[in-house]
Amino acid sequence: MNDLSSQSLQLSQRTVIVDILRGWALFGVVLMNYYDFFTIGRNWETFKPDLLTNIIMYTAGFVFAAKSWTMLSMLFGYGFAVLMNNVSNKGHNPYGFFAGRMFWLLVLAFINSAIFFGDILKDYALLGLLLLLFYRSSAKTSFTVSIILLLIIPGLNSFIHSLGDSGWKHMTAILPLYQSHNLLDVLYFGLKGTYLAQMISKPYLYTVHVVMFCCFLWGFTLYRINFFSQLATKVKYVKKAFWISLGASLLFMAILILDQHLKWNMLNRYYNITYWVVLSTMLFISSAICWLYVAGKCNRFFASLAIMGKMTLTNYMVQNLIGMLVFSGFGLGIFNSMPIWFYLLLAIVVYTVQVYLSHWWLSRYNYGPIEWIWRQLSYRKRLPLRK
């Protein structure tokens, strides 16, 4: 089969539910990334939010905070397994290919970090190399390791929290760079902010990366058991996952609230289950989407999510570029001066416009523009963009 035919076949065999989940996660990403500009640099000791602001903050925190990047991490693990299998079937060395692909993702991450200080591509690029160790693992092995990591996370979280080093405290000193009218200052802030808030921040450097890798292994396990590719035959497991994850998230949240209300502070000191709340809620949302999809509900909405999911990388980087042009001093300079609803409404508008633009683009081209560039760099050959 020639390259063009093979390429067309691969495009037609995309698993729709995976694109839908990616699209939903990307919606949460833009909401919370823009929400960050409402919070960063704000004096929370003097800031007194009104009732509407409190409702929006708690709702956004429960539904979206950390749920999107954990969901994307799970899908990254699934995509890794799909890619390695496809490359191996074509006779290529999957290890060398994937290592090269992660190198170019790291290059894109450098660009994205300059635009936005909350880049996540670098984490996927580096942790993705560690995932190579599990390429030939069984579902049982990958899932067992993920459960071990899951049990470690609360203890690790408490220990890292006790060190009292967030990295974020250094961000305040360099905020004037982001408010500068000079583009180079703004881009330097992005790189410096990424370094301070993520690369040397102990909670991010250790806890967040362990959580990410746990999700990677979940996604890898789902591929090994053909979960998404045979979703229609696994409805009972989807329903079971829905109810178990819902019950777990409510239970863990109740424990956290009780611990805080009674001022025991036991969880912070010894076994902080905050990420168990995050992960169980993420699984609840993911299984709910899968259940609705299999039941044939929300078809138009899911079609829009799938369109976004096919261009995840392009849309993610464009969202960050728009954010820079709106919030930085080089752009409109809005920063944290607007009420909270403005940031979330802007995110919704940007996402909606991207849905239409993605639909227009994919009706004419095989890949999103950045996906196309990344794919050519990975395969080291020119691939046709136009259909």
Image (cartoon, rainbow, N blue to C red):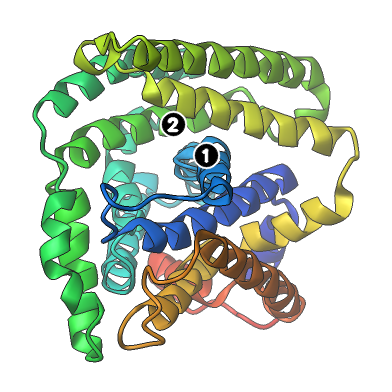
Q: Quadrant of residue 268?
A: top left
| Amino acid marked by disc 2 | Cys
Q: Is residue 110 above or below residue 160?
A: below
Circle 2 Cα neighbour tier, 10 Å, few/some/many (<14 / 14–19 / ≥20) = many
Residue at (17% x, 76% y) in the render: 176
Q: From this viewpoint, is residue 376 visible?
A: no
Q: Which element type, helix, strand or loop, lies under badge 2?
A: helix
Q: Are marks 2 and 1 in contact (CB under 8 Å)?
A: no
Q: Quadrant of residue 330?
A: bottom left
Q: Which element type, helix, strand or loop, lies under badge 1?
A: helix
Q: Is residue 146 above or below residue 69?
A: above
Q: Position of residue 200 (x, y in %)?
A: 12, 48
Q: Label 2 to label 1, Cα distance in Å?
A: 24 Å
Q: Position of residue 160 (x, y in %)?
A: 16, 27
Q: Nearer the viewer, residue 305 or 276?
A: 276
Which residue carries the number 2 mark?
Answer: 215
Q: Is residue 41 above or below residue 363?
A: above
Q: From this viewpoint, is residue 339 visible?
A: yes
Circle 1 Cα neighbour tier, 10 Å, few/some/many (<14 / 14–19 / ≥20) = few
Q: Nearer the viewer, residue 275 or 104?
A: 275
Q: Indicate the quadrant containing the N terminus: top left, top right, bottom left or bottom right.
A: bottom right
| Amino acid marked by disc 1 | Tyr
Ranked by sequence position, the earlier of labels 2 and 1 is 1
Q: Position of residue 97 (x, y in %)?
A: 36, 54
Which numbered mark, 2 or 1, is in the foreground of this view? 1
Q: Which circle marks residue 58 in the picture?
A: 1
Q: Nearer the viewer, residue 112 or 14?
A: 112
